């Protein structure tokens, strides 16, 4: 019901906006109300035609290949939703301007009145057809007609009311924000649909399940109860999902969400100016630019089929008051997709200086195991990381790091990650920066291991900063793994205390990590 | 070529040739452990100490199994009906238990280095 309500609400609101813009631009034109009303009517009629057509098509196909059809409709809906999100973000404003220009032309008599009818009819038809398609998608996902109808009515009422209110200037919600919020809601919705589509494709024998029951929360939040069903439709929740569902879900989020972040970002001249002023004043240019908010040494080996939820963070102590008390947190969800490839996506938030804790970036990490463990003198892997900044003016980052590991003896293992980072996008520095992470670990027993680790950033590759502006830290850590009930289910922990060797690094840093694997 | 580019290509080269540069002969002594009915056969495997050996784990069961050993520092998932090759050692003389993560009740074994 909620899913239908959100979609109908948004589509109706969009149509209402078009109508409002047309009406606003043609104020004073005689009988424009009549033309616009006919336009709305024609649009609705067209959308009904599309619906009827879709209905008969569905009936023709029903029986044979129902799963395929459902999957097809769902995937089409996912593609449309994604495209729609991207397109609206990019061209919404342009569209509004064009409509105003046409409205002006009608008002001054250079264009005939029926143009109004066509604009309105097309807008309503487009939004209506989208509603039909998405409604089919939701129905194919197993939602029954009653709640959907209720949702549709609620969405229609809400969208129409808001459209009217906006037109009469009663409310002044910044439209951009409204669309941003509904855009992200729709992204989750699309991801849920993609996950559902993958279920149908597994049933049709076209996709492998990649593991049944990644987790089982049917005792806690069964999907057939009301809250479970709500989450299912809204964000694609499932109480016993297959591996392929998670992949479809994440792939959709990454693709559409990543594109939304990338494409909908406007170049900000103010940002560039500010950066230029900073450079001129000589402020903010000292020290390595690329900050990695949290510290971790990566091993080169990948565990196939393992799913991992990871939280790690740190807290800084420093004699410089403005840097004392800075802290950062990351949350990752990952899985060993093959014997040699582990992929994870996560969120990073950070409290810097006098600012509040805020979302810094969305990260996508991929680790590749390049050698079979123990086969050669040293084990080798590769880490790649893409970091999309959460704020418009911040640059994005890319990281490449070879992962080198050597079992020195029965108990001691040494690991080194040289890190090559660079920024791209808005206000990016055109340089590669060199950093590193290493650890020497004693494998005492599964539940308790200990060692020494170090992290550093030296500044631009081949042209490093003066020593004291570089960041170098070193310190002890303990870690371990506690087995839980399920097969391969374990909880891992690590706590370390790092001491700043140079002035550029915080005096002390407490770092922690908690990982749930299954 | 700028210095960063040179450094980067050097790293890339190391990563690319690492397998061959550090290569040991493929024909290390091979040992095989078969997984069937959620058990390892043989459940005790004797290998020479102080040598790197190749261990083939042949999972003849229908479902996946994970060969796991904290002592050997190895964890590897082997899908049902397929084989995996592990490289272990050189080991000090001693007993190195391993088990199957998916069926720890029955799938137990050990490598004995002597």
Image (cartoon, coloured by chain):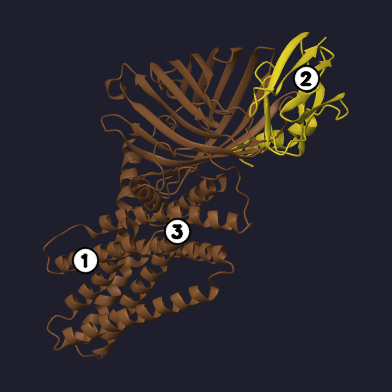
Chain colours: A brown, B yellow
Q: Is residue A336 above or below residue A170?
A: above
Q: Circle 3 is placed at which residue position?
A: A141
Q: Disc 2: which chain?
A: B
Q: Circle 1 is placed at which residue position?
A: A157
Q: Nearer the viewer, residue A388 or A346?
A: A346
Identify the residue at image location x=24%, y=85%.
A38
Look at the image and tell me in which quarter the C terminus of chain A lies.
top right
Q: Circle 2 is placed at which residue position?
A: B43
* Residue A62, position as x, y percentages in the image: 53, 71
* Residue B15, position as x, y percentages in the image: 69, 35
Quarter of the figure with residue A361: top left
Identify the residue at image location x=37%, y=29%.
A328
Q: Are marks 1 and 2 on the same chain?
A: no
Q: Is residue A112 above or below residue A136?
A: below
Q: Give the spatial CA distance, label 1 vs label 2.
A: 70 Å
Q: Give the spatial CA distance, label 3 vs label 1.
A: 24 Å
Foreground: disc 3 or disc 1: 3
Density class for disc 3 (Cα within 10 Å; few <14, some 14-19, many ≥20) is: many
Q: Nearer the viewer, residue A265 or B38?
A: B38
Density class for disc 1 (Cα within 10 Å; few <14, some 14-19, many ≥20) is: some
Look at the image and tell me in which quarter the N terminus of chain A lies.
bottom left
């Amino acid at each position: 019901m909620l899913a239908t309500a959100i979609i109908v609400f948004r589509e109706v609101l969009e149509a209402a906006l078009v109508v409002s813009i047309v009406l606003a631009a043609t104020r004073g034109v005689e009988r424009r109300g009549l033309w616009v009303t006919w336009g709305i009517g024609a649009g609705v009629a067209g959308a009904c035609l599309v619906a009827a057509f879709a209905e008969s098509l569905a009936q023709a196909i029903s029986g044979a290949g129902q799963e395929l059809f459902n999957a097809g409709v769902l995937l089409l809906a996912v593609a449309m939703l994604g495209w729609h999100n991207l397109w609206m973000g990019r061209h919404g404003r342009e569209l509004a301007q064009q409509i105003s220009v046409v409205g002006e032309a009608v008002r001054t008599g250079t264009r005939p009145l029926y143009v109004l009818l066509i604009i309105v009819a097309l807008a309503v038809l487009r939004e209506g057809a989208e509603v039909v398609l998405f409604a089919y998608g939701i129905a194919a996902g197993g939602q029954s007609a009653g709640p959907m109808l209720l949702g549709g009515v609620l969405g229609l009422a809400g969208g129409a009311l808001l459209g009217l209110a906006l037109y009469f200037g009663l409310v002044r919600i910044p439209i951009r924000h409204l669309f941003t919020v509904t855009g992200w809601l729709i992204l989750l919705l699309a991801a849920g649909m993609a996950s559902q589509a993958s279920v149908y494709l597994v049933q049709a024998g076209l996709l492998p399940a990649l593991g049944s029951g990644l987790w089982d929360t049917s005792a806690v939040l069964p999907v057939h109860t009301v809250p479970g069903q709500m989450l299912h439709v809204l964000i694609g929740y499932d109480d016993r999902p297959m591996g392929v569902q998670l992949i479809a879900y994440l792939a959709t989020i990454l693709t559409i969400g990543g594109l939304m972040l990338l494409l909908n970002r406007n170049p900000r001249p103010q940002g560039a100016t500010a950066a230029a002023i900073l450079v001129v004043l000589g402020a903010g240019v000292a020290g390595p630019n690329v900050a990695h908010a949290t510290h971790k040494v990566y091993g080169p080996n990948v565990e196939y089929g393992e799913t991992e939820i990871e939280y790690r963070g740190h807290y800084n102590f420093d004699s410089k008051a403005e840097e004392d008390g800075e802290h950062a947190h990351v949350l990752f969800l990952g899985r060993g997709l093959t014997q040699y490839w582990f992929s994870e996506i996560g969120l990073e938030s950070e409290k810097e200086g006098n600012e509040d804790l805020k979302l810094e970036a969305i990260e996508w990490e991929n680790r590749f195991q390049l050698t079979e463990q123990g086969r050669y003198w040293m084990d080798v892997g590769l880490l790649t990381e893409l970091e999309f900044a959460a704020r418009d003016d911040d640059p994005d980052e890319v990281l490449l790091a070879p992962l080198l590991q050597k079992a020195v003896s029965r108990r001691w293992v040494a690991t080194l990650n040289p890190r090559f980072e660079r920024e791209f996008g808005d206000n990016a520095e055109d340089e590669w920066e060199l950093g590193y992470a290493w650890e020497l670990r004693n494998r005492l027993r599964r539940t308790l291991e200990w060692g020494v680790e170090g992290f550093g950033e030296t500044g631009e590759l081949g042209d490093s900063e003066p020593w004291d502006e570089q960041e170098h830290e070193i310190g002890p850590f303990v870690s371990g793994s506690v087995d839980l009930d399920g097969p391969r289910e374990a909880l891992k922990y690590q706590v370390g205390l790092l001491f700043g060797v140079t002035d550029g690094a915080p005096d002390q840093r407490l770092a922690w990590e908690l990982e749930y694997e299954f | 070529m700028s210095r960063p580019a040179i450094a980067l290509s050097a790293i890339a080269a190391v990563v690319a040739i690492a397998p061959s540069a550090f290569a040991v002969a493929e024909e290390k002594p091979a040992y095989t452990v078969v997984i069937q009915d959620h058990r390892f056969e043989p459940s005790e495997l004797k290998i020479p100490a102080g040598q790197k050996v190749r261990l083939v784990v042949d999972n003849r069961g229908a479902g996946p199994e994970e060969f796991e050993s904290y002592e050997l520092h190895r964890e590897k998932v082997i899908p049902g009906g397929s084989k995996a090759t592990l490289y272990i050692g050189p080991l000090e003389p001693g007993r190195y238990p391993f088990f199957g993560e998916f069926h720890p009740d029955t799938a137990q074994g050990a490598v004995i280095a002597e």
